[in-house]
Image: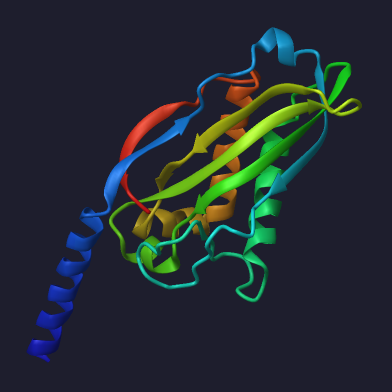
Amino acid sequence: MRFSLGLAKLTGVLALMLLAGCGGTFRTSYSEGVPAAQSANWRLSSVTVTAPRSLVVSEAEVFIPKADIVWREDLSTGNRYEQVEAIMENAIAQGARGLKGSRPVRIEATVTRFHAMTFKAETQAPSGVHDVEFDLQVKDARTGEVLFGPEHVEASFPAMTGAQMARARVAGQSQKSQITAHVAQTIRGLLGLGPDARRTFSGIGG
């Protein structure tokens, strides 16, 4: 028993050392936002999100899978690309719902990375990152004219882990609700509908 406990402790220490080696700098970022005076004339018509099938999906239950798409909360038998598309469409629509002008626009986005936390990382890692990135453009819904973009958007943010995330789940939150809220907040700032959410932070993530 004493040997088993010692081995478990050693394994945990090695895991933490491995995670520490995966630390880096992440951002909520975009180079240029839409001037509020311009977006005031827009009205949201539709949102379309594409997760290219060339992106690599991982189902490995490890701390940080080497993949472009890592997602666990929806059904494991489902299509991860479609699940990510649905999450992002909802998040972007929430962020853009303040567009109430006269010119109908459609927002098109292409996911380049959607690396959420595995359940192993959520429950055992000391910290983490939800790494969400996409390319976005706004078009006139009637003519197809590009009004903004393409713009690469990073909507990454620190992930809750351990007891903090356990308490959040009891309160009704989930990874999906947290990612949706942050992407929506990022979109509001980008469209001139809310405060600028851009920031840089250090974290452990893929």
Q: Position of residue 169 (x, y in %)?
A: 51, 58
Residue 161, compared with residue 190, is above or below; it is below
Q: How is the image coloured?
A: rainbow
**Image check: 87 left or right of 105?**
left
Residue 54, compared with residue 61, is above or below; it is above
**Image check: 123 left or right of 41?**
left
Whether residue 172 appears in this view of the structure is: no
Q: Position of residue 31 (x, y in %)?
A: 50, 22
Q: In the rendered image, which quarter contains the C terminus?
A: bottom left
Q: Position of residue 150 (x, y in %)?
A: 64, 29
Q: Position of residue 70 (x, y in %)?
A: 50, 61
Q: Quadrant of residue 201?
A: top left
Q: In the rendered image, which quarter contains the N terminus?
A: bottom left
Residue 72, compared with residue 40, is above or below; it is below
In the picture as drawn, the residue positioned furthest to the front comes out as 54
**Tally of marks:** 0
Residue 79, compared with residue 33, is above or below; it is below
Whether residue 138 appears in this view of the structure is: yes
**Image check: 12 left or right of 83?**
left
Residue visible at 49% across and 68% down in the picture: 58
Residue visible at 80% across and 19% down in the picture: 42
In the picture as drawn, the residue positioned furthest to the top comes out as 37
Residue visible at 61% across and 20% down in the picture: 194
Q: Quadrant of residue 81?
A: bottom right
Residue visible at 58% across and 23% down in the picture: 189
In the picture as drawn, the residue positioned furthest to the right comes out as 142
Q: Nearer the viewer, residue 81 or 192?
A: 81
Q: Quadrant of residue 4?
A: bottom left
Q: Nearer the viewer, residue 54 or 101?
A: 54
